């Protein structure tokens, strides 16, 4: 691996906890990046905020495309070799999980990642509704977070302002979907763009 | 190759002549299908009609997603190894081209396919506006069609009714985008699903 490639910056990975394609990418992106000597910055994101700007809507609500997408999600999980069960409630509000991720990430990106994957698997494999605050706290405790401290943080306004600012920053960088990856200034939307991301990393662009 | 696989039916390929991802799929689908002993039925389609049902809109008109998509189209062309130039007029009405394709296809699927690829390349490589009737007639003549006969057909109402019915039939099968492929009852939307189509053909599902 060349020095230039090793010196290259981290990959930005934007995801919404309610996005199944975001879950697929979350399971794949760190290993993919590591193959090319890259690290990944995980950014929790809220699709609901972008829908107000783009005029887009949650997949299940779209005639024809909604039915297709529900089927495509299950097939894509099998294609990626990942466990998946369509959640009973979908989509769901993911603010609590996103804020918990941000707070954990400031303290330990590794622990935040563990929480992120645990939350995604709870929702998309075990059909646990992660919109619930108590559930988010339980999952965070499961990766070693102080439940009382996190509970106090999530009740405050600071973390809300922080998440809103992170989402605003993402949108100013062009993020409108999940997963959304930025590699050396190049944007890739969708788990189906991972092969393009891989080629970009391997060849330094194409 | 097993007898069962050889006996399997053709792949349905829906495309709109104004869809760059449809162009990518058009360049790839016949060879892909042939590797698994399959033929392909090409179906010209009108995305504008589906937009009225799905509430979706042409890509360039969508904030954030539009700008990304224009970039993704050019990069995806390079990824697929296909020539591409963003047309000056995009998107465009494609009724004339779709109707010409249908008429040609009734007489010779091979000639219709030649016309389809020629029209796609004219639009997405040479920046020729194929919404123009005279241009459609010229491209059809280039693949050996009788220009006067086709001109009379396109001026009539029969071919209009026919295309409308074909689009209606596609929508009743769940088609809402371009490219859209149906393999043994399984639907795949998007040029980025070609790897899933290939695996489906290779493994008889997954």
Image: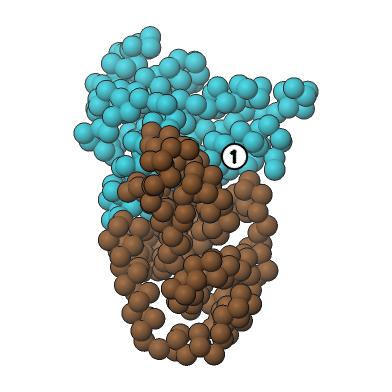
Chain colours: A brown, B cyan
A59 over B57 or under it: above or below: below
A85 over A79 or under it: above or below: below
Q: Residue at 47% across / 75% down in the picture?
A: A107
Q: Residue at 70% across / 28% down in the picture?
A: B8
Q: Residue furthest front?
A: A3
The quadrant holding residue B161 is top left
Q: Which quadrant does the C terminus of chain B fall into?
A: top right
Q: Chain of mark 1?
A: B
Can the viewer see residue A38 in this picture? yes
Q: Which quadrant does the N terminus of chain B fall into?
A: top right
**Quick one: A16 or A26, which is closer to the camera?**
A26
Can the viewer see residue A62 in this picture? no
Mark 1 secondary-structure assignment: helix
Label 1 crowd bin: few (<14), some (14–19), many (20+), radius 10 Å: some
**Quick one: B115 or B74, which is closer to the camera?**
B74
- Percent from the top left, x then y, of residue A191? 50, 50
Q: Residue at 72% across / 23% down in the picture?
A: B6
Q: In the rendered image, which residue does mark 1 sit on?
A: B196
The quadrant holding residue B204 is top right
**Quick one: B50 or A7, which is closer to the camera?**
A7
Q: Residue at 63% across / 42% down in the picture?
A: B186
B189 over A105 or under it: above or below: above
Q: Residue furthest right?
A: B3
- Percent from the top left, x then y, of residue B154? 33, 25
- Percent from the top left, x then y, of residue A38? 46, 49
- Percent from the top left, x then y, of residue A25? 53, 54
Q: Is residue A128 left or right of residue A96?
A: right
Q: How many marks are shown on the rendered structure?
A: 1
């Amino acid at each position: 691996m060349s020095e230039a490639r090793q010196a290259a910056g981290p990959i930005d990975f934007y995801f919404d906890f309610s996005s199944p394609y975001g879950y697929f990418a979350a399971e794949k992106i760190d290993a993919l990046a590591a193959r090319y000597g890259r690290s990944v910055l995980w950014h929790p994101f809220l699709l609901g905020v972008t829908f107000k700007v783009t005029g887009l809507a949650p997949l299940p609500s779209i005639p024809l495309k909604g039915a297709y997408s529900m089927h495509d999600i299950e097939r894509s999980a099998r294609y990626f070799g990942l466990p998946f069960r369509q959640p009973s409630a979908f989509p769901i509000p993911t603010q609590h999980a996103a804020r918990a991720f941000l707070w954990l990430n400031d303290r330990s990106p590794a622990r935040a990642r563990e929480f992120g994957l645990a939350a995604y698997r709870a929702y998309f494999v075990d059909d646990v509704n992660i919109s619930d605050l108590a559930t988010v706290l339980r999952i965070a405790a499961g990766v070693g977070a102080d439940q009382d401290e996190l509970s106090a943080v999530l009740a405050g306004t600071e973390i809300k302002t922080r998440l809103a600012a992170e989402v605003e920053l993402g949108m100013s960088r062009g993020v409108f979907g999940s997963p959304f990856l930025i590699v050396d200034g190049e944007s890739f939307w969708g788990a189906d763009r991972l092969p393009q991301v891989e080629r970009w990393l391997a060849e330094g662009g194409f």
